[in-house]
Each structure stands twice: as C-alpha cells, then as structure tokens.
C-alpha cells in the first residue's frame, strides 16, 4: 500500500522569516506533500495583508529546490480552525517550529486542544535551527520600525517589502 503523507505547516507569516523557511525546508523531508497554511485572520493586527503575506511566501518558496524525492509545497488559506483545515487537506500531521522554552506553553495548549478536537491529526515539533532560535516576525517588525538592521533575519525580498511597509 502506498500511502501519501500530507503535512500542514500553519502560521501567520507576517512576514515570513528565515526561521520559517528553515522549518519548511526541513518539514518537507518528512512528508510527501507539505501545505503551508496561512491564517487569514491572525488574531493580531498584521502589518501585511493576507495577499501580501502569501505573495512573499510564494516568492521565497519558488526558490526552494524542486528535487526528486522532495515533497511538493503548496500555500493555502486557513479560514477557520486549523484542525478542520488539516482534515480538508487530508493531512495527518501539523508541523510547528519550537524556538525557546517561552514557545512551549502556547504550543502545548494549542497541540493539546487540537488533539482533543481531532485525535487523527498529530502535531509534530521541529526545533528551530541554532542560528534561527531567536527570530520572530514580531521582533523583526519591531527592529525594522526602530531602524535596526534586520537583514539577517528575513530573505532579501521580504526585507525590501518591510522597508516599504514601514516607510
Ligand atoms: O504564526 P503563528 O501566529 O504562531 O500561527 C498561529 C496559528 C495560525 C497556527 C494559530 O493561530 C491557528 O491555528 N489558527 C487557526 C484557528 C484555530 O484553529 N484556533 C484554535 C487553536 S487551538
């Protein structure tokens, strides 16, 4: 039996960072198809619109190698519950990145509630690579707003969009 494993990597991606790209590159080695789910409503006030967030993600993902044996990657909107989205996509796995201990509480609650709502969907955590452990979209935006150098935290194109968005 040839069962194809579908994984979902959900997030706000406001904007996509080098940390996100790293998790996506690693997650795609674990599944046959990876769906990057972009939250339409983030619950926060995003700097970038849904369309802008998707545009930036798609531009960066098109640069990732399309080698044989590597999962295809699609970007899709999450309009409601993550677990409903995962079921719709036929995904059995939700991938989340873990940076510091401070991420754990929120991720623990979310994984627990999602598991209770949808026991067939498993949440899998990837530890952020050492060079990305401190990167977050929120802090990148703060550094950008305050005129700091954020060039090593986001892809170049995203950096240019950030400068335009805050000026
Ligand atoms: O990048 P983020 O902001 O940490 O991503 C959060 C996200 C989008 C994964 C989370 O807010 C989410 O799952 N939203 C969908 C709505 C939902 O299912 N909420 C209940 C979670 S228990």
Image: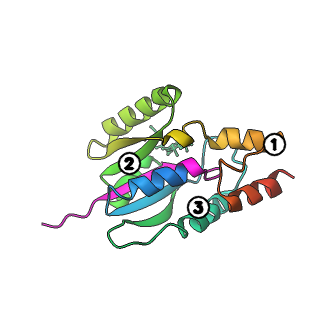
Outermost residue toward the right?
Answer: 167
**Around disc 1, counting alpha carbons within 10 Å, would you say few (fewer than 14), some (14 to 19), or many (20 or more)?**
some
Name the residue: 35% across, 58% down: 29
Residue span colored magenta: 1-19
Judged from the image, the secondary structure of the residue bearing numbered disc 2 is: strand
Name the residue: 46% across, 66% down: 74
Residue topped by disc 3: 57
Name the residue: 49% across, 26% down: 101
Q: Is 141 placed above or below 52 here? A: above
Kindly report the distance in space between the C-alpha atoms of the residues bearing marks 1 and 2. Answer: 32 Å
Judged from the image, the secondary structure of the residue bearing numbered disc 1 is: helix
**Residue 137 falls within the magenta-colored stretch:** no
Q: Position of residue 70 (x, y in %)?
A: 36, 66
Q: Are marks 1 and 3 in contact (CB under 8 Å)?
A: no
Q: Is residue 12 visible?
A: no
- Disc with the residue nearer the chain's start (1 vs 2): 2
Q: Horizontal placement of 76 versus 140: left or right? A: left
Q: Which mark is residue 145?
A: 1
Residue topped by disc 2: 94
Q: Horizontal placement of 113 versus 46: left or right? A: left
């Amino acid at each position: 039996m040839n069962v194809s494993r579908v994984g979902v990597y959900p997030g706000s991606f406001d904007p996509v960072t080098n940390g996100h790209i790293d998790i996506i590159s690693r997650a795609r080695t674990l599944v046959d198809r990876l769906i990057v789910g972009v939250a339409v409503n983030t619950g926060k006030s995003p700097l970038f619109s849904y369309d802008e967030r998707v545009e930036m993600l798609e531009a960066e993902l098109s640069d990732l190698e399309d080698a044989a044996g590597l999962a295809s990657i699609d970007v899709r909107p999450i309009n409601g519950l993550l677990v409903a989205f995962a079921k719709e996509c036929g995904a059995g796995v939700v991938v989340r990145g873990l940076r510091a201990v401070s991420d754990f509480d929120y991720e623990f609650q979310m994984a627990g509630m999602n598991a209770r709502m949808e026991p067939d969907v498993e949440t899998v955590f990837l530890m952020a690579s050492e060079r990305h452990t401190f990167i977050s979209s929120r802090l990148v935006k703060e550094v950008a707003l305050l005129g700091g150098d954020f060039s090593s935290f986001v892809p170049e194109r995203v950096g240019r969009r950030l400068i335009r968005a805050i000026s």
